[in-house]
Amino acid sequence: MDFDITSALDGDVLIVTFTGRSTEKNARAMMKRYFEIVLGSGTKKVLADIRPLQGRLSTGETYFLVRDLPVKPTPAGIRTAVLETKEKREYAAFLETTSDNAGVFLKCFVDREEALAWLRAP
């Protein structure tokens, strides 16, 4: 396996960190593992930190991955913030838009504190 996903609680927020390499071949396995962690935690606020992950899927691969998530429909009430690097801001914007179009609500950030504030806002 060329990726790892770890998790830790930061108060009321589950921090899920992706490391290794992102490829079309392992993307579905990553999403399956991500949902196992999130659903198993019982937490409703999730910060998905993809900054350490090497590489990103193409826009087409991302589009189809979001539309074919292993958990459908995505669980109601879970608020997800995705933390991305400044250099990959355009990818983050596409991920947010294509997810919204597929009925998967998430918001992308490049600043960890802003992401946590958004998750903890009423």
Image (tube, helix red, strand yellow):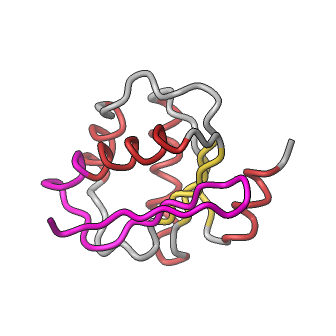
Looking at the image, residue 27 sits to the left or right of residue 46; the answer is: left
Any magenta on residue 9?
yes
- 20 to 118, vertically: above or below: below
Residue in the picture at 51% in, 74% down: 85
Q: Position of residue 44 (x, y in %)?
A: 64, 40
- Looking at the rendered image, the quarter that the N terminus falls into is bottom left
Quarter of the image where one finds residue 57: bottom left
Give the answer, above or below, for where 54 lies relative to 25.
below
Q: Position of residue 36 (x, y in %)?
A: 37, 42
At 26% across and 46% down in the image, what residue appears?
Answer: 60
The stretch of residues the image draws in magenta is 1-29
* Residue found farthest to the right: 122
97 versus 103 height, above or below: below
Q: Residue at x 27, y 56 (%)?
A: 58
Identify the residue shown where x is 45% and y is 40%.
98
Residue 24, percent across and down?
A: 17, 54
Q: For this view, does 112 lie left or right of residue 91? A: right
Residue 33, image x, y percentages: 32, 48
What quarter of the picture does the C terminus occupy? top right
